Amino acid sequence: MEFPADFKGLGCNQCLNANPLSFVITMAYQPIVDVSTQSIFAY
């Protein structure tokens, strides 16, 4: 994968001490379906 020239990798402390995001993230967990057995494999 190619990264932009101004890319900076972050460590755990940088994420923990970072300012909060200016937007809210919402997500829904979708099931992982095994189509061969037509069953839910995982969430």
Image: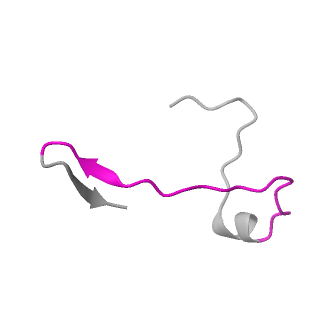
Give the image location of residue 3, x and y in percent: 62, 32
Query: In terms of secondary structure, what is the magenta stretch mainly?
Result: loop
Which of the 4 image quadrants contains residue 26?
A: bottom right
Depth check: 9 or 22 in front? 22
**32 or 22, nearer to the observer:** 32
Side of 31 relative to 2 (left or right):
left
What colour scheme governs how the chains and residues are painted in the rendered image of this protein?
A: one colour
- Residue found at x 37% / y 55%: 31
- Asked whether 30 falls inside the magenta stretch, the response is yes
In the image: residue 10, left or right of residue 30: right
At 54% across and 56% down in the image, what residue appears?
28
Q: Nearer the viewer, residue 8 or 26?
A: 26
Magenta region: 17-36
- The vertical placement of 35 against 21, above or below, is above
Determine whether 15 is above or below 9 in the image: below
**x and y percentages locating residue 9 in the rendered image:** 66, 50
**Residue at 26% over, 57% down:** 40
- The picture places residue 18, in percent across and down from the top left corner, at 81, 64
**Residue depicted at 71% across the width and 55% down the height:** 25
Q: Is residue 41 magenta?
A: no
Q: Is residue 27 left or right of residue 35?
A: right
Q: Quadrant of the C terminus?
A: bottom left
Q: In this view, which residue lies farthest toward the left?
A: 37
